[in-house]
Amino acid sequence: MNKKNVVIVGAGPTGLLCALGLAKTGIEVCVVERADAIQHSPRAMVYHWAVLDGLEKLGVLEDAKAEGFLSPELQFYVFKTGERIHLDTREALKTLSKTPYNLHLGQNKLAEIALSHLQKLPNFSIRWGVDVTGLTQSEHEVTLHCQQGDSQEDISAAWVIGADGANSIIRRSLNLSFDGITWPERFVATNVRGDFAKLGFSNATMMLDPEVGAIVARIDNDNLWRVTYCESLELPEDQVPERIPGYFAKILPEGTEYEVIQYSPYRMHQRAAESMRVGRVLLAGDAAHITNPTGGLGLTSGLFDIFVLHEALTAVIEGRVDPEILDRYSESRLKAFLEHASPAASEFKKLVYHCSDKEELEHKLAGLRHLQAHPELQVAMFGTAKSVETPSLISG
């Protein structure tokens, strides 16, 4: 293989969009993925307004809008009292963005769009069903040790990017710590078909309650919704599907028709690697840092990673900048995650799922009511997503 190539481990949206950014400049890119196809389990599906410019630069925004939809809505719904507080990105962000909306689209759909663009490029390839088991690197190249079925092989590259999720074999092969916490609950993400709008849910609703709190968001134009709640770890995970009807019976009016299409139980974390670069190996997305998904800042952080990374790595490969710039990539992206994304997601999680202190909840609700009455003050809330962004290391 051409030694000026890049191998990306992981065919989620982070890995594939990073591949697209590199491949569009002519760099040879290969993606390797242990699964046999793009995974469709319920995961991220709301992309903040702040990442839309980056998706547009990569050439995928129009396709993403066609597959999903843009929405300005955010609702805080107090389950016990029925109070609903509505915020709208359009008024708050009209001076900050030409697209003051959030994009709703399942992350598998975004990955499929990126892959469709990549498959039109002659310098891109993808290999499914390849399990990376470790790596070694020298001054000039990285060698991935791989298993495919009963066959073992090595794949060499000038650079490797680990975009292979929270359990990243790339990060573990580099012996990097992944410090932080694991929350003492289980999340259950469900994709549900039903008319939730008729029940008063907006396109994006934070339902606040210490017992049945949830994030409720519309995924598509065919009444598919994501409802993500949490439960005790003491409950057996293998019985999650048996408990799902009981949860919906608590939050929906009696007789409401709905159909659970998919579900996915998983643990929640606030963790970050000690570095996102070791020699010729780089990390991006959940492989580098992971947050609970409340507030939609996980994949948002991963996208901001690759917007910076593909541009900086291209400049390094083309000899326009010193590889030291990749250390700055690591430092700036970890700082943005630790100082902005992770704390904000933690606060949103506490508000939605752990709002048992009535005095504290009323204080927060009073602030939200004030924001509802004064859209010009909503910039700070919606600006949380922008705070996770870091500027280009090439153009500033």
Image (cartoon, grey):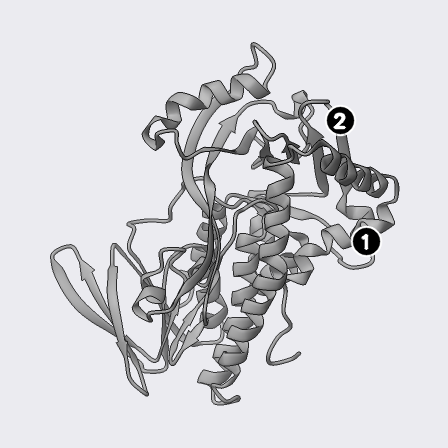
> Is residue 72 toward the left or the right of residue 334 in the image?
right
Q: Is residue 40 visible?
A: yes
Q: Is residue 43 above or below residue 300?
A: above
Q: Is residue 277 above or below residue 380?
A: below
Q: CA distance from mark 2 to mark 1?
A: 27 Å
Residue drawn at point x = 58 percent, y = 68 percent: 335
Residue nearest the observer in this picture, 249 or 226: 249
Instruction: Name the kind of residue labelled 2 in the image.
Output: Glu
> Is residue 20 toward the left or the right of residue 103 in the image?
left
Residue nearest the observer in this picture, 371 or 143: 371
Instruction: Name the kind of residue labelled 1 in the image.
Output: Lys
Q: Earlier in the sequence, mark 2 or mark 1?
A: 2
Residue, disc 2: 83
Residue nearest the observer in this picture, 34 or 330: 330
Q: Which element carries disc 2, helix, strand or loop?
A: loop
For disc 1, the neighbor class at 10 Å (few under 14, some 14 to 19, many from 20) is: some
For disc 2, the neighbor class at 10 Å (few under 14, some 14 to 19, many from 20) is: few
Q: Where is residue 286, by image quadrant? A: bottom left
Q: Is residue 207 above or below residue 331?
A: above
Count of labels in the image? 2
Q: Is residue 275 above or below residue 232?
A: below
Residue drawn at point x = 58 percent, y = 10 percent: 254
Residue nearest the observer in this picture, 275 or 181: 181
Residue, disc 1: 94
Residue drawn at point x = 73 percent, y = 56 percent: 383
Residue 40, horizontal then vertical, whole percent:
40, 42
**Outermost residue toward the top?**
255
Residue 81, horizontal then vertical, whole percent:
73, 22
Q: Is residue 311 visible?
A: no
Residue 25, horizontal then vertical, whole percent:
49, 75
Q: Which element carries disc 1, helix, strand or loop?
A: loop
**Outermost residue toward the left?**
150
